[in-house]
Image: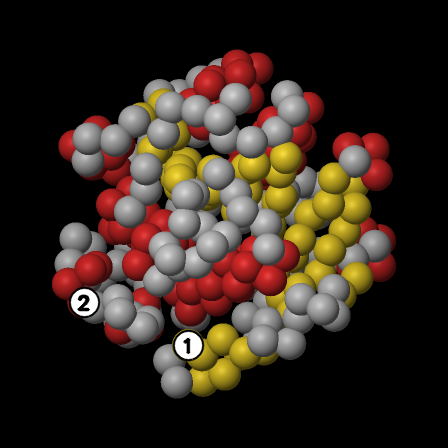
Amino acid sequence: MSAKKVLFITQEITPYVPESELSLIGQNLPQAIQDKGREIRTFMPKWGIINERRNQLHEVIRLSGMNLIIDDTDHPLIIKVASIQSARRQVYFIDNDDYFQHRQMTTDADGNEYEDNGERAIFYARGVLETVKKLRWCPDIIHCHGWMSAMVPLYLKKIYNDEPSFKDSKVIYSIYKDGFNSNLSPDFKKQLLLRNITLDDVKMIQEPVNYEELCKLAITYSDGVIQNSETVNPNVLDYAHKMNIPVLEYQPQEALADACDIFYDKV
């Protein structure tokens, strides 16, 4: 077992949000990988629908307090944590008053997608990586689930590649059928630019940026891809195969953990 530490960056985890294919994998896969003897950490957004009292979330003061600048605006980073007692593990939550408090998940109560979803995803990706730095924890594998985590591979390879916590990390992106139906903000590609990231680094995605383009961005900077839904966008899957990186085809849920466990040591 060469990949001893696995960081899960996911969009949904049940029971904190309603059950879906993504949220069930977000709960069950990290648990199964931990049970196989690997050390794990798990992150998700602190969606506004999460009941903090019922789920016993509390702020981690030593990790909170940083400001992340997106589109020339400061956004305070708040880190919360909850324990899954029966599973002997914790879940870290990325929170911010503007992006997550008093909101639903990726759509409002009427089903309309939030206009700043791109910014929220950027904040989430950077928030997770900055928090892992503060934890001084060095993951061997970073496994991203859901389009909210699609910026992680770009930032990992272009900004955080020299950080001690990530210099040996490999990143895997999981493809799901679930995405968003509209386009991200026309300013999204500009908002991605940070430090030494240039427009040339994101030239593989076309505008307007939709779900397919966002997946292509994630795959471009990933070391491996996993097809988590039985049916996914064929253009996205074809793009993954053309990138000449390991691709794990769809696995039934009962076989997923064993397949991922083997795949982690291949990338």
The residue where tag 2 is placed is: 199
At numbered mark 2, what does the secondary structure look like: helix, strand or loop?
helix
Task: Left or right? Give the position of 41 relative to 266.
Answer: right
Q: Tag 1 or tag 2, which sits nearer the N-term? A: 1
Where does the C terminus fall, quadrant-wise?
Answer: top left
Question: Against 184, is 9 above or below?
Answer: above
The amino acid type, in three-letter code, at marker 2 is Leu
Task: Left or right? Give the position of 221 relative to 111.
Answer: left
Proximity of marks 2 and 1: CB atoms separated by less than 8 Å: no
Whole-percent x, y for residue 23 in the image: 59, 39
Whole-percent x, y for residue 132 in the image: 57, 56
Picture residue at 35% right of the left edge, 33% below the top: 225
The amino acid type, in three-letter code, at marker 1 is Ile
Task: Left or right? Give the position of 133 relative to 244.
Answer: right
At numbered mark 1, what does the secondary structure look like: helix, strand or loop?
strand
Q: Nearer the viewer, residue 39 or 217?
A: 39
The residue where tag 1 is placed is: 70
- The total of numbered circles placed on residues is 2
